[in-house]
Image (tube, helix red, strand yellow):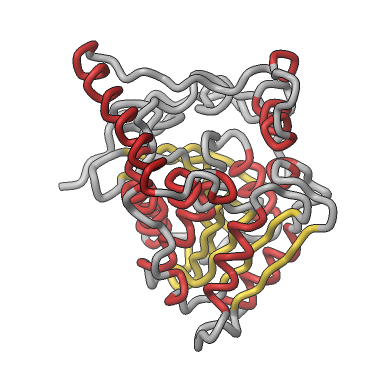
Amino acid sequence: MFKNEELNLTKEWDKTFEKSDKVDHKKVTFHNRYGITLAADMYAPKDADGKLPAIAVCGAFGMVKEMASGRYAQAMAERGFLTIAFDPSFTGESGGQPRNIASPDINTEDFQAAVDFLSVQDNVDPDKISIIGICGWGGMALSAAIADTRIKAAVTSTMYDMSRQIADGYYEAEDSEEQRHEKKVALNQQRTEDYRSGEYKLAGGLPAPEELPEGTPDFVRNYSLFYKTKLGYHPRSVAGNGGWTVTGTMSFMNFPLLKYVNEIRIPVLMIHGEEAHSLYFTKDAYATMTKDNKFADNKELMIIPGAVHTDLYYKMDVIPFDKMADFIRKAIGE
């Protein structure tokens, strides 16, 4: 029998954004196929009745639901959807041990578990469930869309392909067998040290903006300005505090998330900033989904002029919520 573990959920509103008076909010929990209990914020249009279209939202990589995913979920609830923003396994208020690790399999499963949960809610139409993935969870959203035929539309925002980034480095700067081997040697030495010490060493979070050395890339500076200031800091976030464990993302090197992305049949909207360092992840995935592909007609790429990667984390006048809502409504036949 499936049972949710008891999680210690915060009762007060501790988001990095203000609560909307247009939606109702409550905390919920659900379990994934590995027995991990996930914590989520549920947002519903105020005074809504009947069965609603639903959306599960997650991301960015290193965030918790009180940050970008909550912003997206609340904004989409204002537009008539029942939404949940959830903490992935091993992070935030969700369960799973050890903490601060990620998995291409388990985190894809987290999205599918969210669909499980939404599918059985009395106020949700199970034939009208979609997902939104932000940053690294954009790649996980596409992975879930490859596997889960219950998902009717997928939206990615400022997407990272974490398998590609971790295995090959940025812009394929570490894309060689020799460089990957060196990474694996270091990571496996760390595994031995962790096992001996009984603790998983943290890689360390981002430095504060004033601590960044001269010559730091602009995108790293933008991350710091978001995660380490009142703009986006949250005490439970991974990236804004101790960071992932040193070995916490190594499995991504062996498991390409987007291997079968060209087999996604459902509508997919990919949104990215024109000036984002990560734009190539979205452009390449979109090209794979649309080139010589019989499922290409319902795929759409939206480039936001002048936007950098982190602008799509929090800038409410830049994130195209109306476009997302219209795209999903069309996909689900509304």
Residue 42 in sight: no
> How many dots with numbers?
0
The relative height of residue 98 versus residue 196 in the rendered view (above or below) is below
Please say if 318 is above or below 213: below
Residue 165 lies, with reference to residue 98, above or below; the image says below
Q: Is residue 259 above or below residue 93?
A: below
Q: Residue 131 appears at what percent x and percent y?
A: 52, 59
Write down the quadrant of residue 140 in the picture.
bottom left
Residue 294 rendering spot, x and y as whole percentages: 50, 88
Left or right: 196 in relation to 116: left
* Image quarter hosting the C terminus: bottom right
Residue at image point 47% right, 49% down: 175
Which one is nearer the viewer's eye here, 119 or 305? 305
Q: Residue at x 36, y 32 (%)?
A: 248
Question: Seen from this angle, which residue lies furthest front?
Answer: 178
- Seen in the image, is 323 located left or right of residue 176? right
At a point 56% along the width and 56% down the height, the residue shown is 132
In front of the other: 93 or 105: 105
Q: Quadrant of residue 188?
A: top left
Q: Is residue 4 visible?
A: yes
In this view, which residue lies farthest toward the left?
1
